[in-house]
Amino acid sequence: MSKKPIIVFEGIEGSGKSHHISTVSKYLNNKKISHIKIREPGGNPNSEKIRKLILNNKSNFNRNTDLLLYMAARSENIEIIKKFYNKKIILIDRFTDSTIAYQHYGMGVDLNLIETLNKYLLKNIKVGFTFLNIVNQKNLQKRLKQRRSLNRYDKFKMSFYNKVQKGFIHLSQKQKNKYQLINSNLEIDKNEKLILSKIDRLIK
């Protein structure tokens, strides 16, 4: 693996992935280690416009439109990723696994279609390592209630999130050496130490 890998933080809503990617970014900044941090959907100005469209509570896209909008946002982000691939550590809040977990396992979109589009966009770009954050239903509900505002993807039924999380876990089991499961029901400090320890091993 490259010492400047793509490191992805995955998980359903309320799983703590966005907190942990921010913690890692601060840690790298303190060590003066060059990196970039992006999110999906989002990441650059065009992708952020698409993000607002996807997550808007007034949006009511069908599942294929949702998929294509996510892929459009990724298409814009790929230019950033290509520019820094193997040159800087790249931290991504959600990436290709999210598309499969949400659109295929959650919504039933054809897996071959998703994989074909991902391969077309990524070409030779490979994810180095993924932190998969797992959360139980009780904590998910509690954390969503604490949010100041909820977007469209925060308002699905619990059965949907269960399917998505099982999809994530299934993906992680295919390449166990490239994933680390983070039990987000545990104390956040313990998980931060676990993740930062792994980060040190990945980049040194």
Image (cartoon, helix red, strand yellow):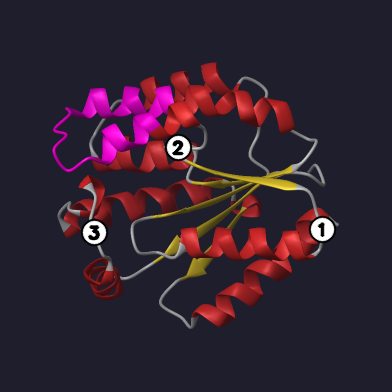
Q: CA distance from mark 3 to mark 1?
A: 34 Å
Q: Counting residues from the N terminus, which is met first, the one under dot 2 or under dot 3? A: 2
Q: Which residues are magenta?
A: 49-73
Q: Which residue position is annotated with label 3? A: 149
Asked whether 106 or 3 is in front, the reply is 3
Q: Which residue position is annotated with label 2? A: 42
**Badge 2, how many Cα within 10 Å: few under 14, some, many 20+?**
many
Kindly indicate whether the residue at mark 3 contacts the one at mark 2 (C-beta within 8 angstroms): no
x then y, percent, for residue 109: 27, 29
Residue type at the position of mark 3: Ser
**Badge 1, how many Cα within 10 Å: few under 14, some, many 20+?**
few
Kindly indicate whether the residue at mark 1 contacts the one at mark 2 (C-beta within 8 angstroms): no
Residue type at the position of mark 2: Gly
Predominant SS along the magenta part: helix
The image quarter containing residue 204 is: bottom right
Q: Which mark is residue 83?
A: none
Residue at the image position 63 percent from the left and 29 percent from the top? 80
Q: Counting residues from the N terminus, which is met first, the one under dot 2 or under dot 1? A: 1
Total labels: the figure holds 3
x then y, percent, for residue 133: 46, 62
Tag 1's secondary structure?
A: loop
Report if residue 102 lies within the magenta region.
no
Looking at the image, is 107 positioned above or below residue 92?
A: above
Q: Which residue position is annotated with label 1? A: 32
